[in-house]
Image (cartoon, rainbow, N blue to C red):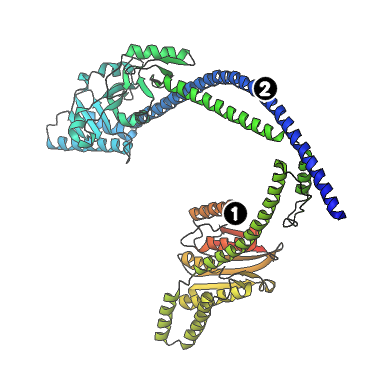
Amino acid sequence: MEWIARLHGENSAAALRAACYHRRVARSRTVRGSIFLSVSVLLVCTLLAFSLVVYDYVSAVARERFADALTSLSRSLVTNLDAQVAEMDRLSLTLIYSQVFQGLYARHLALPRVPVSTSQRIAKLENAEALIEICETILGPNRSAPQISVFDLRGEMIGAGYYSRLVERDVRREPWYPDVMRAGGERVIRPPHMDPLLEETSIIVKDKRYVSLVRTFQDALLSTQGIVEVEQYCDTLFGELDLLRGSSVSPFVFDSAGNQLYPYDGPAADGSTLRRLADRASRRPIMAGTLPGQREPQILAVAASEATGWTVLIGEPSAGLAASVLQYALRIALLTLTAIACSLAASYFIARRVTVPIKALHTEIEALDLENLDTASEGAPRPVLGEIDELRLAFRDMRRKLNESIQEAVALRAHEKEAQLVALQSQLNPHFLHNMLQTIGIMAEEGAAAGIQDLIMNLVRVLRYVSSTEGTTATLGTEMGYVESYLAAMRARFGDSLEYRIDISPALREIEVPRLILQPFIENCFKYGTSARPPWRIAVRGAREDGRWMIEITDNGPGFSAATLARVAQRTAARDRAGGGLSPMSISGMGILNSFERLRLAFGEGTVFEIANQPEGGARVRIGAAVDG
C-alpha cells in the first residue's frame, strides 16, 4: 500500500505542476499578444516607408538601366553597320588597287568603245570576261556582296555578280554622279534603292532593295579613270535591325543629310524630326519622346557613327518601363510582408518556456553520432507535452528513420554497383569472329594444320573468357592471358604485319580488376592503328608506380584525333562532377569510356585514366588504381 500512496503523491505533484504550467502559458500568451500587436504596428509602418523609398530608388535605377540598355543596343547596332560598310569599302578598295584589275582595265580603255573588226570584238569580249572574273574572285564564293559594277567615263559598265556582262550605260546621267566626282575618290554611300538591271536578271533578287558604296579611282597620273559601285542587300546590311521587328523596340537610321536609311521598305519619316529627337536624346541620360509612327511616348537612345556619319535612334515604350518598375516594387513589398509574417509567427512560437526542453534536446543532439544513430535515450516522460517536447520526439523519430534510410542506401548502392558492372560487361562482345573464320579457311587451303590448331586454341580461349559468366572480376594475370590469346589470334590473321609485346610485373598478376577491362583498348589499337602502313606494333606494359598498379597500352597508328581527346576529357570531367550513377558515355560504341566507368566504380576517385598521343606518333592509354583499392 505504501507504493500506492507514493504513486498518488507523485500524481498530485504532477497535477500541481501542470496547473502552474497552464497558468504561466496563459500569462505568456497575453504578453505575447501585446508584444505581437505593438511590433506589428511598428513593422507595418516601417514597411510602408521602406516600400516608398524602395519604389523611388528602384524606379530611378530601373530607368537608368533601361536607358543604358537601349544605349548599348544602339551602339551595338552602329558597330554592326560600320562593320558591314567597312566590308563593302574593303571590296571596292581591293578591286581598284588590284594590279591585275588595273592592267585589265587599262586594256579595256585602250580598246575602241565600238570595235570595227572581229579581232577587236573578240579581244574586247575576252578582256571584259577577265574583268568580270577578277570582280567575282574578289566577291568570293560566298558572295559577300551581290553586285560590283565598274563604270568608265565613256558610257560603258562592266557588272559582276547577279548581273555579269558588259553593257552600255552612261554614268554621267546617274543622279549620284556629281556627288561621287566631288568626293574625289572618297566613298559615297547611296541610300536604299532598287536596281532595274538586277530586277530583270534573276527572280532571286526580285523586289530587293540595295545600299551602294560608290567611289572614283585614278591612274598613276591621278586622272579619274572610272567609278566602282558595290551593292549590298538592305536586309543583309540592316539584318540586325530587322531582328528587332515584332518587338517593342522601334529603330530608325538616317544619314548626315537627314535621309532615312531604315526602315528601308516603309514610308519615310521627316528627317528634321528624327534629327531633333536624336539631338535631344544625345544631351540627356534619359530622354522621352514620340517617334514617327508611334502613338505613345518612348524612352529614346541614340548612337552616331564617325565612320559613316549615320545615326541610329531607337525607342521603347515608357509605359512598359513604368509597369515593370511597379511590378518589381510590389514584388518587394510582398516578399517583405511575407518575411515579417514569418518572423512574427516564429517569434510567437519561440517566446515560450523552453529552456529545459531545449537543453535536453541540445544534449541529445550533441551525443548524436553515426555509431549510435540506432540508439536513443528516452528520457524522463513529461505529463504535459509542449512544442519543444514534440520536437524532441520528432527528432528521435527522424533519427530512427535516418538510420533506416542510411542502411537502405548502403544496401541499394552495393546492388547498384554490382548491376552497373554486370551491365557494362554485358555490352562487350567479340568483334573479330568473322575474320578469324576467314583466316582459318585460308590457312586450311594452304595446308597450315599446325597454325590452324594454334589459332583455334587461342580463339577458344578468347571466346571462353568473353562468354564466361563467372563473376564480374578477374586477376590482371588472367586478363593478360586473354590479351595474349587475342593478340596471338590476330597475329595469325595479319602475319608479319603485326608485332606485339606484353611485359607485366609478376607482382601485379594477382590484383583483381573488372573483367575484360583491357579489351576495348586492344580493339581500339586494331580499329584505328591498322589504318597506318604496317608493320603495326602494339605494346602492353604493367608495373607498380607510387603505390598504384599501372597498365600502359601503346600502338604506332595515327593516334587519337583532337576531337576524340577533347570529347573524352569533357565527358570524364562531367562524370567526375556527376559523382555516382551510370553516365551514358560512348565513343564509337561503349568501349573506352565504359572502361573508365567500370574502373571508377571499382576503385573510386583514385582511378587513373589517361589517353593521349605519343610524341613519336601513335596512341597511348594508361589506366591504374591504388594497389590496395
Q: Residue furthest right?
A: 2
Secondary structure found at label 2: helix
Vertical placement of 455 versus 121: above or below?
below
Q: Quadrant of residue 518?
A: bottom right
| Residue 27 falls left or right of residue 188 | right
Label 1: which secondary element: loop
Residue under circle 1?
Answer: 579
Tell me: 395 left or right of 80.
right
State whether residue 306 appears in this view: no
Crowd tier of the residue under label 1, counting other residues whose Cα lies within 10 Å: few below 14, some 14–19, many 20 or above: few
For residue 310, what is the image quadrant?
top left
Is 456 located above or below residue 514 in the figure?
A: below
**Marks 2, 1: nearer the viewer:** 2
Q: Which residue carries the number 2 mark?
A: 38
Question: x, y (%) of residue 139?
Answer: 32, 36
Residue 548: x percent and y percent?
A: 68, 63
| Three-letter amino acid code of the residue under disc 2 | Ser
- The x and y percentages for residue 66 are 48, 23
Name above or below for residue 559 compared with residue 492: above
Relative to 237, is 600 on the left or the right?
Answer: right
Residue shown at 48%/78% (left/top)? 492
